[in-house]
Image (cartoon, grey):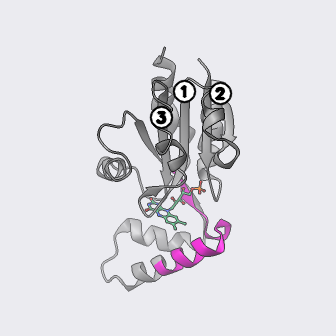
Amino acid sequence: MKTVVVYKSMSGFTKKYAEWIAQELSADLSEAKKIDNDKLQKYDTIIYGGSLHAGGISGVNLIKKNLKRLKGKNIIIFTTGASPSKESTVSEIRERNFSVDEQIRFYYFRGGFDFNKLDLMNKVLMTLFKWVIQLKRDKTADEKGMLASYSKPVDFTRKENIRELLEYVRSLK
Ligand SMILES: Cc1cc2nc3c(=O)[nH]c(=O)nc-3n(C[C@H](O)[C@H](O)[C@H](O)COP(=O)(O)O)c2cc1C
């Protein structure tokens, strides 16, 4: 079974998970901008990873817009975000990004946050977000952690997070 791991990553957290997955499955690895539908056709299993931006999975349209042409293939999507992995958050992200009839296996892995590695537009967006949190009177522990991470990058990536995804892909015939 031919497998590819495709990723879109700005500060490296999604890339790290994509590399771990590709290595464990002896799969091909490609940046999203270097692959298109024709190249995806070579594979039986496509694993796509993109970081979470305001609840949306970056670059996931590469897969979504080609779903009809990818019919019959195993499609697995993962996203990484700065927030802790909670069941409610994960189902919210799933519902927001995919319709119920889309047969997509979905995983959320906690990534990290490194303000200095963002491009200008995302620096501006995240600065606005920081101001919004700062203005809140009762901040949650996660919001306090998020504020602290602007001056000190945080990395929550853990290789063991990909175990379930690996087991699922290995179980496919
Ligand atoms: C504009 C912007 C919006 C973000 N929105 C979310 C979000 O809604 N939920 C979340 O958990 N993390 C959010 N993050 C954090 C990133 O998803 C997180 O840092 C991710 O691990 C980055 O992965 P990358 O280095 O592969 O790009 C956001 C980051 C940026 C820059």
CA distance for labels 2 and 3: 13 Å
Tag 2 secondary structure:
loop
Task: Tell me which residue sits at (48%, 81%) in the image.
Answer: 128
Tag 1 secondary structure:
strand
CA distance for labels 3 and 1: 8 Å
x then y, percent, for residue 84:
41, 54
Residue corresponding to mark 3? 76
Front residue of this view, candidates 107 and 161:
107
Looking at the rendered structure, the kind of residue marked 2 is: Ala
Q: Residue furthest top?
A: 173
In the depicted structure, whether residue 3 falls above or below residue 31: above
Residue corresponding to mark 2? 27
x then y, percent, for residue 100:
29, 40
In the picture, the quarter occupied by the N terminus is: top right
Callout 2 touching callout 3 (CB < 8 Å): no
Tag 3 secondary structure:
strand
Callout 1 touching callout 2 (CB < 8 Å): yes
Looking at the rendered structure, the kind of residue marked 3 is: Ile
Is residue 23 found left or right of 147 in the rendered image? right
Instruction: Give the class, few, some or many, for how many residues have Cα within 10 Å of label 1's Cα (few <14, many ≥20).
Output: many
Front residue of this view, candidates 17 and 103:
103
Q: Magenta stretch: give its range.
A: 110-128
